Amino acid sequence: MPFETRQLGQLVEAVSNLPGVNSTLAAQYADAAVPTVGVVPPAGDVISAVTAARFSAHGQAYQTVYSQAAVALDLLARVLGATVAAEAPTMIARAAEVG
């Protein structure tokens, strides 16, 4: 089996796995979403209130960053899928020429 054909097979397999990876990450994120923002109510003192507010803000920032990363991962999967679909015939033809 020519190198390009083998490489194409590995590339197609990797690209086809990306949606599954994205789904797994989304499921794990959904499980962690509530605990990252929902902190234990603070005690009556100011330090506890400030600490709880900071933890909550950190959790919200994490959720914002993760949402942006999820969009980027989805875009990456779609672009790679389209690229592989567009380049596959060329790679197969080249591999056939090489023999």
Image: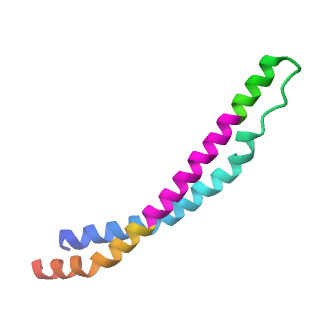
The residue segment tinted magenta is 57-77
Q: Position of residue 59 (x, y in %)?
A: 67, 39
Quadrant housing the C terminus: bottom left
Quadrant housing the N terminus: bottom left
Q: Is residue 41 left or right of residue 22?
A: right
Q: Is residue 31 left or right of residue 13?
A: right
Q: Position of residue 75 (x, y in %)?
A: 46, 63
Q: Position of residue 68 (x, y in %)?
A: 54, 52
Q: Nearer the viewer, residue 35 or 9?
A: 35
> Outermost residue, left direction?
98
Residue 12: quarter of image: bottom left
Q: Nearer the viewer, residue 45 or 84?
A: 45
The relative height of residue 4 versus residue 33 in the rendered view (above or below) is below
Q: Nearer the viewer, residue 33 or 17?
A: 33
Residue at 70 percent across and 40 percent down: it is 36
Q: Position of residue 62 (x, y in %)?
A: 61, 42
Question: Is residue 64 highlighted in magenta?
Answer: yes
The relative height of residue 44 versus residue 18 in the rendered view (above or below) is above
Question: Is residue 13 highlighted in magenta?
Answer: no
